[in-house]
Image (cartoon, helix red, strand yellow):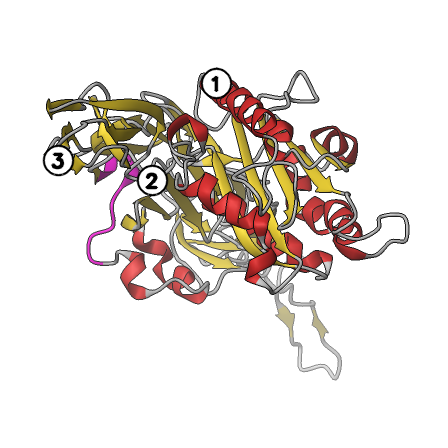
């Protein structure tokens, strides 16, 4: 039916319904979608050693755009770089995280945990021996490490130590090297990366030691050189100090080729019936010295071997032991050294049965203070210590016979006799004659000298004689008067009749009696140090 109206002026009309047009549908706008970024973290090492630097890298991608920023957390301050480096000086686990943002403003995050551990070795207080020409590789440590250089005692000239990092330790953690001979020390200061300067100062390093002006890169090598002008003191040491767990390193010991002059004791005796005897000899420096002696007069000199001559009249020369004009060679206590402690139990030094006097104090020293000082040299093995440090109480006063005894342990490489006696022992000496039993004395002293002459190295057989003063009256100190003559080569005890020309024997006078074990331990250690032992 069409859309019309019929109007017939009738009160009624017919009108059709109007149909509305269909509405125009406007679709909503299409929203554009964005893919957020993704991120993971990689680490150069998830279980690094203390102070080792770790590189963290954010591996981020955005499928429909680009990553425009990186914000790292878990560090001292945020970074905006793709990679960062982190380190730590404490044994702990630390978590690091990163937030990345793409060019549409969307973000993603990731985290990683790094576990720092202590990889270092706390080195014992024990030096390491290094020989000439050796290349030594040192692993990581913290604290100090000492090196004693062998094969160098008889050489003079420049001793050079060449240092370099190993290829496995590129991090350049600073370490300080000190080279010492005869009281003179040369030092590198802390060489390595200067990134550790603040930490070194916090750990107590002085500014002068840090070497901030021109820190040396050990990878390219550095060296220390010291001029060794004489054979003795023979000890040349290198001490490495690491306040921070160091990276490993290597060094080579370069020794000089020039040998120092060896000198020996010679007893010179004038024999001219008329006039004097004139001797000449070369001293350790090669200078000619002259000695003029009347008939039967003697003098002990230190001369180069085969350099003593008699130019005027006649005389005799008697060669003794090596004289060590420039200092005795260093001796080292180790598990191959045997100590034999002789105690004169003839009555004057106390009664061991009653537990009183010097005998008891010396026994306590051997079991306590001396063991505390030496046990570490015997690998903290009490059984080994007891095998190597032996205590003998004897009533035999023939002290030079004691010193000539062989090692009790056949595997020992060095034997040291510690002989404690008093000042009134009558075996060799009395007020009535030079010695009451000259055959015993001469026999014992010749046996002792024969033992010393048979040693291949100085120090293989040594003896210290401690004279404990029982009385304060000089007139009754018959034995110590005799000892003074034997040790100084006077009153007929010169040359092979005495011991003044033997460096292997020393005498300790005026040791107090009735003291405790701590006192005798102090006296003993001092005497061993005087003999060249590094204790």
Q: Give the extent of the magenta segment.
A: 213-226
Residue 149: give its label: none
- Distance CA(mark 2)–CA(mark 1): 19 Å
Give the x, y percent position of residue 209. Answer: 31, 58
Reading the image, the residue beneath label 1 is 455
Mark 3 or 2, closer to the camera: 3
Q: Residue at x 75, y 79 (%)?
A: 12
The residue carrying pointer 2 sits among few (fewer than 14), some (14 to 19) or many (20 or more) residues within 10 Å by Cα, namely some
Label located before the other in sequence (1 or 3) = 3
Query: Which element is circle 1 on?
Result: loop
- Distance CA(mark 1)–CA(mark 3): 30 Å
CB-based contact (under 8 Å), mark 3 and mark 2: no
Label located before the other in sequence (3 or 2) = 3
Nearer the observer, 10 or 178: 178
Query: Which element is circle 3 on?
Result: strand
Reading the image, the residue beneath label 3 is 289
């Amino acid at each position: 039916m069409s859309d019309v109206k019929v109007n017939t002026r009738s009160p009624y009309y017919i009108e059709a319904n109007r149909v509305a047009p269909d509405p125009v549908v406007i679709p909503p706008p299409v929203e554009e979608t964005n893919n957020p970024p993704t991120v993971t973290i990689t680490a150069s090492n998830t279980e690094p050693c203390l102070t080792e630097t770790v590189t963290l890298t954010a591996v981020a991608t955005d499928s429909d755009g680009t990553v425009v920023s990186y914000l790292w957390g878990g560090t001292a301050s945020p970074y905006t770089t793709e990679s960062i480096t982190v380190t730590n000086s404490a044994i702990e686990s630390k978590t690091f995280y990163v937030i990345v943002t793409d060019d549409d403003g969307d973000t993603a995050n990731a985290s990683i945990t790094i576990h720092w551990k202590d990889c270092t070795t706390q080195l014992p207080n024990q030096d390491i021996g290094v020989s000439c020409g050796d290349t030594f590789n040192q692993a990581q440590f913290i604290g100090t490490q000492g090196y004693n250089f062998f094969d160098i005692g008889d050489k003079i000239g420049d001793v050079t130590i060449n240092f370099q990092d190993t290829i496995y330790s590129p991090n350049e953690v600073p370490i300080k090297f000190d080279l010492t001979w005869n009281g003179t020390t040369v030092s590198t200061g802390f060489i390595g990366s200067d990134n550790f300067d603040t930490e070194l100062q916090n750990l107590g390093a002085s500014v002068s030691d840090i070497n901030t002006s021109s820190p040396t890169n050990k990878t390219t090598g550095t060296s220390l050189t010291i001029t060794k002008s004489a054979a003795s003191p023979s000890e040349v040491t290198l001490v490495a100090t690491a306040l921070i767990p160091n990276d490993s390193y290597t060094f080579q010991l370069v020794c000089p080729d020039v040998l120092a002059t060896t000198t020996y004791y010679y007893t010179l005796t004038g024999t001219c019936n008329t006039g004097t005897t004139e001797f000449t000899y070369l001293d350790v420096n090669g200078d000619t010295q002259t000695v003029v002696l009347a008939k039967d007069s003697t003098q002990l000199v230190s001369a180069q071997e085969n350099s003593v001559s008699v130019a005027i009249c006649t005389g005799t020369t008697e060669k003794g032991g090596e004289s060590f004009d420039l200092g005795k060679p260093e001796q080292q206590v180790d598990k191959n050294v045997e100590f034999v402690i002789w105690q004169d139990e003839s009555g004057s030094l106390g009664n061991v049965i009653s537990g009183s006097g010097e005998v008891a104090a010396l026994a306590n020293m051997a079991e306590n203070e001396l063991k505390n000082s030496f046990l570490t040299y015997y690998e903290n093995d009490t059984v080994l210590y007891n095998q190597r440090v032996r205590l003998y109480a004897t009533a035999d006063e023939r002290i030079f016979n004691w010193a000539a005894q062989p090692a009790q342990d056949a595997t020992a490489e060095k034997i040291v006799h510690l002989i404690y006696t008093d000042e009134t022992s009558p075996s060799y000496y009395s007020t009535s004659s030079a010695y009451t039993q000259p055959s015993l004395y001469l026999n014992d002293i010749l046996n002792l000298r024969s033992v010393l002459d048979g040693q291949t190295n100085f120090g293989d057989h040594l003896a210290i004689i401690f004279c404990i003063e029982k009385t304060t009256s000089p007139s009754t100190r018959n034995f110590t008067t005799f000892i003074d003559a034997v040790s100084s080569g006077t009153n007929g005890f010169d040359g092979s009749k005495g011991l003044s020309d033997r460096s292997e024997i020393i005498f300790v006078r005026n040791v107090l009696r009735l003291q405790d074990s701590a006192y005798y331990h102090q006296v003993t250690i001092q005497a061993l140090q005087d003999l060249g032992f590094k204790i």
